[in-house]
């Protein structure tokens, strides 16, 4: 699909799409750039790219496609530095979890005369670990890749990015940047924020020994620590760049938490039972929807055969 692809940020997500590109032969040359020299060394040892670079300009020279797999807070500076060195028609895309700020920070450095195209995208996939060693090509299978086009996204570039992620066996969807950020704030950003908060609160409780918390942690707390083990830099940038939507959701969550507090204080068992029954029903619907999806995909695969 491309003569040269450059991935900026060869961590968990960057190394996973690098594996897909190598496996599916999507680029004649695949280059990885990262400020973490250990990551570059690991990427080369793992043979998930053809070349590694700690020089940003050298990394992007003659690239047809550049994938930002670095924290969203880095986009503006990276774009400002590389744009003068890109050839006409270069496509820039990204994997960030917040899209309005991504489009703003990239496109403010791109002029109409440059011929550079930006297609903002987000693979809704990942694990709570960091580095190229933990990446794997199968990470994206049967997950959603959301494209959030801007005025600078051409149909041709959108098609190419869609085909790239389809090769990773992702399902493609398109929505506005604003809607994407609102949806992700609800299903991903707020749950992560709550996990960070709960783990921090429990760790700071007086009268509890840290070793006891670790020793006697049930599955519920372990689930929170899994989420809270996510990359600090990435999540700091997500919260600061999607702050309006997240603050709105935090306010709603606090109000619901206060209502729960009142139910418990005044022994309002019926209200607690209603809430727990409703959330149990939602959990069941989520599982059933996933099972139906898997069955439908299996049916379609069999029909194609």
Image (cartoon, grey):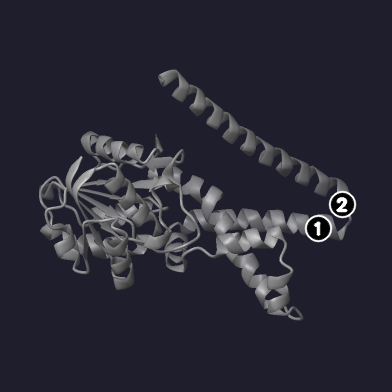
The local crowd at label 2, few if under 14, some if 14 to 19, many if 20 or more residues have their Cα within 10 Å, is: few
Which quadrant would residue 82 be assigned to in this image?
A: bottom left
Task: Give the residue drawn at x 61%, y 66%.
Answer: 197
Which quadrant would residue 158 be assigned to in this image?
A: top left
Disc 2, SS: loop
Q: Earlier in the sequence, mark 2 or mark 1?
A: 1
Q: Out of 181 and 211, give the one closest to the viewer.
A: 211
Dot 2 and dot 1 residues touching (CB under 8 Å): yes
Q: Quadrant of the C terminus?
A: top left
Q: Which residue is mark 2?
A: 268
Marks 2/1: CA–CA distance: 8 Å
Task: Judge from the rendering whether residue 116 lies leftward or rightward of residue 98; answer left or right.
Answer: left
Q: Which residue is mark 1?
A: 262
Residue 36 x, y percent position in the rendering: 32, 71
Residue 245 x, y percent position in the rendering: 50, 53
Task: Give the residue drawn at x 52%, y 25%.
Answer: 296
Task: Judge from the rendering whether residue 90 lies leftward or rightward of residue 100; answer left or right.
Answer: left
């Amino acid at each position: 699909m491309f003569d040269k692809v450059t991935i900026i940020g060869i961590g968990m997500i960057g190394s996973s799409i690098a594996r897909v590109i190598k496996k599916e032969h999507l680029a004649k040359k695949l280059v990885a750039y990262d400020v973490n020299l250990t990551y570059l060394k690991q990427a080369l040892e793992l043979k998930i790219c053809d070349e590694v670079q700690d020089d940003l300009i050298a990394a992007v020279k003659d690239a047809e496609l550049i994938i930002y797999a670095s924290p969203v807070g880095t986009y503006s500076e990276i774009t400002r530095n590389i744009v003068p060195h890109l050839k006409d028609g270069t496509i820039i895309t990204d994997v960030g979890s917040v899209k309005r700020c991504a489009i703003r920070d990239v496109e403010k450095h791109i002029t109409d005369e440059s011929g550079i195209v930006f297609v903002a995208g987000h693979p809704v996939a990942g694990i709570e670990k960091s580095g190229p060693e933990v990446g794997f090509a199968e990470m994206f299978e049967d997950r959603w890749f959301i494209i959030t086009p801007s005025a600078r996204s051409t149909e041709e570039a959108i098609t190419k990015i869609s085909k790239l992620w389809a090769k990773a066996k992702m399902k493609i969807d398109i929505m506005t940047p604003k809607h994407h950020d609102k949806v992700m704030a609800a299903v991903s950003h707020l749950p992560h924020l709550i996990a960070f908060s709960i783990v921090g609160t429990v760790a700071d409780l007086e009268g509890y020994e840290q070793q006891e918390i670790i020793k006697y942690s049930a599955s519920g707390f372990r689930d929170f620590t899994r989420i809270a083990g996510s990359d600090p830099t990435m999540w700091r940038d997500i919260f600061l760049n999607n702050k309006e939507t997240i603050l709105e959701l935090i306010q709603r969550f606090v109000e619901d938490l206060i209502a729960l507090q009142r139910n418990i204080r005044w022994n309002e068992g019926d209200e607690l039972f209603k809430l727990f029954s409703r959330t149990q029903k939602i959990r069941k619907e989520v599982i059933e929807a996933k099972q139906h999806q898997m069955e439908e995909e299996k049916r379609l695969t069999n029909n194609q055969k």
